[in-house]
Amino acid sequence: MIPYTAGPVVTAIGLAGLLYSEWVGSYLGVWIFKPLASAGFLLTASPALAPSKPHTPSPSPDPSSKPDSFSAPPPSPRSVFNRSIFGSLIFCALGDVLLIPSRHSELFFQAGLFAFLLGHIGFGASFIQRDLSPKATLLSGAAQTIFASIVWRWLSPALPTADRIPVALYTVVLASMGALAIGGAGGWGKSNGNKRWIQIAGAVLFELSDLCVARQQFVAQSFGNPAIGLPLYYLSTTLLATLVWPYKATSHTKAIS
């Protein structure tokens, strides 16, 4: 069985082949290497599929109450977070495949856009579970609103009529995901190493990679768009996938479940 730590290597190999295929214009190569690169970040996030540790609720203050021996204990908050991240990455991988034929079909582009939309909703729902900081969320929300406004002003003149509403909705959801990633980063605590910064970096890099996709699709097609956007995208998804990795606490720290 391939270890999950090999996931980033699989993604790197797939990305190298994908960039070469884009450079030489090999449509077959894109079909081979893009799913491989995306399978890599799913492998990276595969610890999320491990059996969840049950969450033990605090004892009931009522001594007459008896636990239900037939009901399974709820999963831990960490297990719910991990599986939310994995589910979001599945939508991203689906979007990757749907976008391959999008250069020949508007329908596939919109289907891929919808898959990524669901992925970002899932990421946002995951980040909410990390104990949002009201101040950080409001500040990042204001910054993301400015970012989304600038992007829309740049992109909207080039959008076909059929794409205006889907792209506008996607932009709002993408910016909201970024704000929640920053607002919920503090919920990791010091005992989880650098995961707060990994969460922020993964979300921001995802946003930047989407700018390259938008430029390639609507503004100006060139190899520079995938040459910049694809490494940003696969770095972002790999970073987000590592959020589900178990953290090994040292003698001076205590892992947060």
Image (spheres, grey):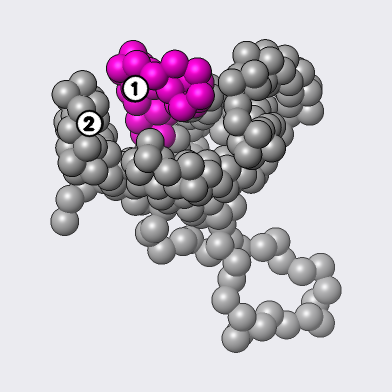
Q: CA distance from mark 1 to mark 2?
A: 9 Å
What label does residue 145 carry, if any? none
Q: Is residue 101 visible?
A: yes
Residues 109 and 238: in front is: 109
Whether 135 is drawn above or below 70: the answer is above
User: Tag 2, which secondary structure?
Assistant: helix
* Residue 48 as seen in the image, left or right of residue 71: left
Image location of residue 94, percent across then percent down? 41, 50
**Point 22% across, 37% down: residue:** 27
Image quadrant assignment for residue 164: top right
* Residue 55 as seen in the image, left or right of residue 226: right
Q: Quadrant of the N terminus?
A: bottom left
Image location of residue 217, percent across then percent down? 46, 27
Q: Is residue 173 visible?
A: no
User: Tag 1, which secondary structure?
Assistant: helix
Whether 214 is drawn above or below 238: the answer is above
Amino acid on which the number 2 mark rests in the picture? Leu
Number of residue marks: 2
Upstream in sequence: badge 1 or badge 2: 2
Magenta stretch: dominant secondary structure: helix
* Residue 23 as seen in the image, left or right of residue 193: left
Residue bearing mark 1? 226
Image location of residue 26, percent across then percent down? 18, 33
**Point 77% across, 69% down: residue:** 60
Q: Categorize mark 2 by other alpha carbons within 10 Å: few (<14), some (14-19), many (20+).
A: many
**Point 68% across, 80% down: residue:** 67
Boundaries of the magenta span: 210-238
Residue bearing mark 2? 18
Amino acid on which the number 1 mark rests in the picture? Pro
Residues 94 and 24: in front is: 24
